[in-house]
Image: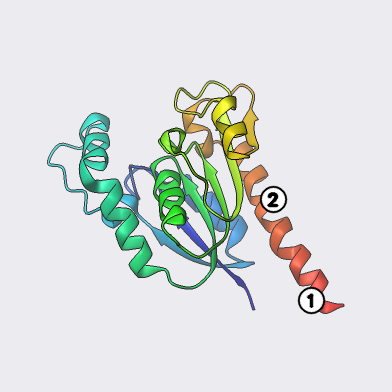
Amino acid sequence: MAEKLVVLSDMWGAKKGLWITSYFGYLQQYYNIDFYDCQQLGDIDVPICTEENIHNAFLNGGIDRAVANLLKKETEPAHYLAFSTGGTIAYKAGLQGLSMKSLTAISATRIRFEEQRPNTQLNLIYGESDAFKPCEIWAQKLGIDLCIVPNFGHDMYSDEKVISEVCLSLLEQVTKKMVRSTH
């Protein structure tokens, strides 16, 4: 039986997310995938969709609504793959008891303000020049190993090279389990 993978978009949701289909292409053969558009999850409805307006809508209650909605929707243990704001939502939901087998968060924006870590296997990936990445002191304090990728910024998750590396890592997780269960 395939493992469940919950995927959370970045703040743009499905609107600017053609890159996300590359992740599905790699992963759908081995995972049962549920996808959430973070704007829908957070009940974000801004008349003018600028980066600033969407960002402010998430800060002014959208993140909390998305966390609450995710906790209602997902009750079974699953792996999580989340991008930018989606990573923040998944991380916060994990702190509130979301049943996670693992969390792979790429460019998660606001977790650097958290003082705890979710009780799950974490793979936090940031571009070297991402202005929103947590500092090493934060990571050490929480016992988290950050994966810092040279020569990339915040939008690294839409780059094909990063997509293939992340997917390979997720596929290794699930195929190792398949090999162990057949012996």
Q: Can residue 63 be seen in this view?
A: yes
Question: Residue 24: percent from the left, percent from the top?
Answer: 54, 57
Query: Which residue is depicted at the point 36% across and 69% down?
Result: 73
Numbered circle sitting on residue 168: 2
Could you say whether the residue bearing mark 1 is in a helix, strand or loop?
Answer: helix
Residue 75 appears left or right of 26: left
Please identify the quadrant where the C terminus is shown.
Answer: bottom right
Residue 25 appears left or right of 112: right
Q: Can residue 8 be seen in this view?
A: no
Query: Considering only order in the chain, which callout, 2 or 1, is on the residue closer to the N terminus?
Result: 2
* Mark 1 in CB contact with mark 2 (< 8 angstroms): no
The answer to whether residue 32 is above or below residue 56 is: below
Query: Which residue is depicted at the point 62% across and 67% down?
Result: 29
Q: Nearer the viewer, residue 105 or 151?
A: 105
Quadrant of the rendered image containing residue 176: bottom right
Q: Label 1 belongs to which residue?
A: 181
Q: Which amino acid does label 2 sit on?
A: Leu
Residue 66 appears left or right of 57: right
User: How far apart are the alpha carbons under marks 1 and 2?
Assistant: 20 Å
Numbered circle sitting on residue 169: none
Please identify the quadrant where the N terminus is shown.
Answer: bottom right
Q: Which amino acid does label 1 sit on?
A: Ser
Task: Count the numbered circles shown.
Answer: 2
Question: Residue 154: percent from the left, percent from the top?
Answer: 48, 29
Classed neighbour count for the residue bearing mark 1: other residues with Cα under 10 Å, few (<14), some (14–19), many (≥20): few
Q: Which of 27 and 136 is in front in this view?
A: 136
Query: Closer to the observer: label 1 or label 2?
Result: 1
Question: Residue 181: percent from the left, percent from the top?
Answer: 79, 76
Residue at the right extreme?
183
Question: Residue 164: percent from the left, percent from the top?
Answer: 64, 45
Could you say whether the residue bearing mark 2 is in a helix, strand or loop?
Answer: helix
